[in-house]
Amino acid sequence: MADYLFILNPNSGTYIGKDVNAVTDTIRRMAEKYRHMAHILYTERRKHATELVKEYLPKKNWEAVVAVGGDGTVNEIGQPLVGTNVPLGILPLGSGNGLARHLGLPLTLTAALERLFQGSAITIDHGLLNDIPFFCTAGIGFDAYVGHLFSQQSSRGLATYVNVSMKAYWNYQPQIFRVNGIQTEAFSLTFANAGQFGNNAWVAPQANLQDGVLDECTIKPFPKWYGTALAIQLFTKQMKPSQYIAYKSIQETVVETEKPPIIHYDGEPLQLETNLIHIKVNSKSLNVIV
């Protein structure tokens, strides 16, 4: 009998908060079916999941530590698992589920549990933004601004995200960055370990979690009418180099901004206190069950 540690974020996404008890019961029932032991903990605040993993990781020989939630929960649980032999499991019940979607994991609870108990682990890379780990994407510019606004909403999910994005779009102004000393004006600057933000918004369709590089995507200033075409490309996995879009594979990059920017890492917004941003990749650093 294998021991699995499940860490559940009751405030994640649009599903868990509605019925935590039902999610808990399903986890216990499926674990019993596969003759495993489910140990379930619940987060109470931001970054609590990281604290719980650090506290409980030494207590047993865990088969996996499982994030029950969205990309923010995955990030908090993945951070202390980096460099260990204990794999990360994902039950994707968040708003965007970018990493789970990139990995091709089922998005329903029962199917995700079956994959968890029947799957095997692969080793993926992760990125660092000023020593903040990210597993999906991190960035500066419009996406970070929308992430900041989205975090302030009372409701979650794709509809809310689209509504916030549309309102922000008409007032947002591109920013000036210095990337490795070269000045550039950009609508957004994204560093992709996985290919999408979440909700199948594929900012870097070619991104590979195991190739030892990050895909740097620069979206240059564009006329307002082009926004619709850009959104269609994003949600149909058709983003590619063009007049307004540039890609580069990087292992390390330094970005300077005019003032300390809002950034996002795996969708979580953060106001930096510095205008110097150091991005790098750590290859083959996290085991994930797929």
Image (tube, helix red, strand yellow):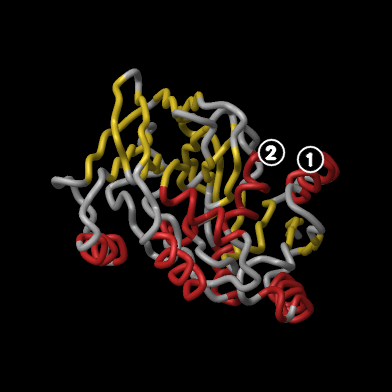
Residue 236: give x, y in percent of width and height.
26, 66
- Label 1 to label 2, Cα distance in Å? 7 Å
Task: Name which residue lies at 23% across and 54% down.
Answer: 239
Rendered view: 23 above or below 288: below
Is residue 242 left or right of 106 when viewed as pictured? left
Residue 177 lies in what quarter of the image? Answer: top left
Q: Nearer the viewer, residue 153 or 108?
A: 153
Is residue 175 left or right of 232 when viewed as pictured? right
Task: Name which residue lies at 61% across and 69% down.
Answer: 13
Q: Which mark is residue 113?
A: none
Q: Are marks 1 and 2 in contact (CB under 8 Å)?
A: yes
Residue tagged 2: 80
Residue 26: give x, y in percent of width and height.
71, 78
Tell me the SS state at disc 1: helix
Q: Nearer the viewer, residue 133 or 255?
A: 255
Give the amino acid at mark 1. Lys
Rendered view: 86 above or below 201: above
Residue 102 lies in what quarter of the image? Answer: bottom left
Residue 161: give x, y in percent of width and height.
48, 67
Is residue 266 left or right of 68 when viewed as pictured? left
Rendered view: 75 above or below 276: below
Q: Nearer the viewer, residue 103 or 15?
A: 15
Q: Which mark is residue 54?
A: 1
